Amino acid sequence: MPRMSRPRVIPTGREITFGEDEIIVSKTDLKGKITYANEVFQRVSGYSEQELLGQPHNLIRHPAMPRCVFKLLWETVQSGSEIFAYVVNMAKNGDSYWVFAHVTPTFDADGRIIGYHSNRRVPDRASIETIKPVYELLAQEESKYSDPRQALEASCALLNKILEGKNIQYEEFVFAV
């Protein structure tokens, strides 16, 4: 499927949510292009299946989401491990929605990674209020740099400093909030 030109979506400042009993599910290929999007994902994101399939998963990336968390996420799943993360996404209309994501690699019969699978649930509100200031700090650090690589390096360094200060890994941090 051809890559659609990505319209510039402006955050509205409005937050939406979805049912606590619902799960947003998506699958991607090795490059992060969406190969499956369930109905909940389509409804919450505001994109149709046709608009999602074949597109990079970062189509729903909210600008307030620190890139260093995505770097950690991708490094983890590309190594063959699973990861849990709090993520703020952006719907097609600019509304934001928080998810507690569980991302795993998908393996073929020979144990090779052939794609990625993500289940996302509504996070606990108290957890969002705990993680938000950390993500805001990381995003502020990224905003200090015009070079995207420098911004990413700086926010990764800050995230590592925060985690070292708490003497925990990211996944432990996620489950502690």
Image: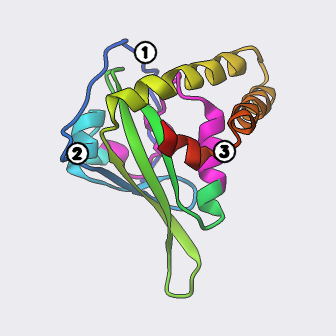
Badge 1 element: loop
Q: Quadrant for the N terminus, please.
A: bottom left
Q: Position of residue 128 (x, y in %)?
A: 41, 28
Residues packed near mark 1 inside 10 Å, few (<14), some (14 to 19) or many (20 plus): some
Badge 3 element: loop
Residue at point 65%, 24% (across, down): 138
Residues packed near mark 2 inside 10 Å, few (<14), some (14 to 19) or many (20 plus): some
Residue at point 49%, 87% (across, down): 109
Q: Nearer the viewer, mark 1 or mark 3?
A: 3
Q: Which residue type carries mark 1? A: Ile
Check residue 70 for magenta coloring. yes
177 versus 9 height, above or below:
below
Residue named by callout 2? 40
Mark 1 / mark 3, whichever is N-terminal: 1
Residue named by callout 1? 10
- Disc 1 and disc 3: Cα gap in Å? 35 Å
The secondary structure that dominates the magenta segment is: helix
Q: Quadrant of residue 159?
A: top right
33 versus 92 height, above or below:
below
Along the horizontal axis of the image, is 121 left or right of 56?
A: left
Mark 2 / mark 1, whichever is N-terminal: 1
Mark 3 / mark 2, whichever is N-terminal: 2
Q: Which residues are magenta?
A: 51-75
Residue 168's tag is 3
Q: Nearer the viewer, mark 3 or mark 2?
A: 3
Residues packed near mark 3 inside 10 Å, few (<14), some (14 to 19) or many (20 plus): some
Depth check: 118 or 4 in front?
118
- Disc 3 and disc 2: Cα gap in Å? 33 Å
So how many labels did they put on this image?
3
**Residue 90 appears in the figure:** no
Depth check: 64 or 162 in front?
162
Q: Which residue type carries mark 2? A: Val
